[in-house]
């Protein structure tokens, strides 16, 4: 009889040695770094107090503050901006204080945006006594594309605005279209809806908005 290990045992030994070293290495990493390896990083956001005090017309530098990081929530002040309508007139959000505002981000190529446009038009007509303003901010298209769609094809009478550079969309952190903000007369966001709106949803959001709106 021989005391030498069998060929099968000799083949297993390197495997056991490798596993042992791997376990020792993992234990050392855990001792050094603790639980940080398994902690999901907290996303960087712009504090709401910074959003609330933003009151100047949007500029590229200002828009970059919010792009990809700032999160607007219900209860925050709607950031001010100036944008042109299709006739070249400048519209400033802050000038509409005292009125309820629906701020809608859309594009002509966005099928869900097309679906909700008749609902927004019906809302605009139904809430004229409440002095409702609807600003339809078009994302990165030109006036000659928007005009025939907005006025001829859809027969809309509320206000289309140009955002050819995407600055206003960045300011409001628009990731999905359509996205709609409901803003009361004090300039406070009362509701945020991502995706197409139904009439009942609009009426519900406006109930909250009009309750917190005073005439200016």
Image (cartoon, helix red, strand yellow):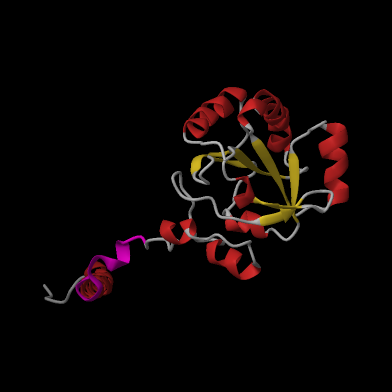
Q: How many marks?
A: 0
- The quarter of the picture where the N terminus appears is bottom left
Residue 216 x, y percent position in the rendering: 57, 40
Query: Residue at 53% of width from left, 46% of height from top?
Result: 187
- Residue 35 lies in the magenta stretch: yes
| Quarter of the figure with residue 140 | bottom right
| Quarter of the figure with residue 105 | top right
Query: Residue at 61% of width from left, 39% of height from top?
Result: 102
Camera-nearest residue between 210 and 192: 210
Q: Magenta region, mostly helix, strand or loop?
A: helix
Residue 169 x, y percent position in the rendering: 64, 54
Residue 123 x, y percent position in the rendering: 66, 27
Camera-nearest residue between 37 and 76: 76
Farthest residue in the front direction? 216
Query: Residue at 50% of width from left, 61% of height from top?
Result: 69
| Quarter of the figure with residue 26 | bottom left
Q: Is residue 46 left or right of residue 19?
A: right
Query: Residue at 59% of width from left, 58% of height from top?
Result: 171
Residue 48 x, y percent position in the rendering: 43, 56
- Vertical position of residue 167 compared to residue 115: above or below: below
- Residue 17 lies in the magenta stretch: no
- Vertical position of residue 78 compared to residue 28: above or below: above
Q: Which residues are magenta?
A: 30-40
- Vertical position of residue 4 compared to residue 132: above or below: below
């Amino acid at each position: 009889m021989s005391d030498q290990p069998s060929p099968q045992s000799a083949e297993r030994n390197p495997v056991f040695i490798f596993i042992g070293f791997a376990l020792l290495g993992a234990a050392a990493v855990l001792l050094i770094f603790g639980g940080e390896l398994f902690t999901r990083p907290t996303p960087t956001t712009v504090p709401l107090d910074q959003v609330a005090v933003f009151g100047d017309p949007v500029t590229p530098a200002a828009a970059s503050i919010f792009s990809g990081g700032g999160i607007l929530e219900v209860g925050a002040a709607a950031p001010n901006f100036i944008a042109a309508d299709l006739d070249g007139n400048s519209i400033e959000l802050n000038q509409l204080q005292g009125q309820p505002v629906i701020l809608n981000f859309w594009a002509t190529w966005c099928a869900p945006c097309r679906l909700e446009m008749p609902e927004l038009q019906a809302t605009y007509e139904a809430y004229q006594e409440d002095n409702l303003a609807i600003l339809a901010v078009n994302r990165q298209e030109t006036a000659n594309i928007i005009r025939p769609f907005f006025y001829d094809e859809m027969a809309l009478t509320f206000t289309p605005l140009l955002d050819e550079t995407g600055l206003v969309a960045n300011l409001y952190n628009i990731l999905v279209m359509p996205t709609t903000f409901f803003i009361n007369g004090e300039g406070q966001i009362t509701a945020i809806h991502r995706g197409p709106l139904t009439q009942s949803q609009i009426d519900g959001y406006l109930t909250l908005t009009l309750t917190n709106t005073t005439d200016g």
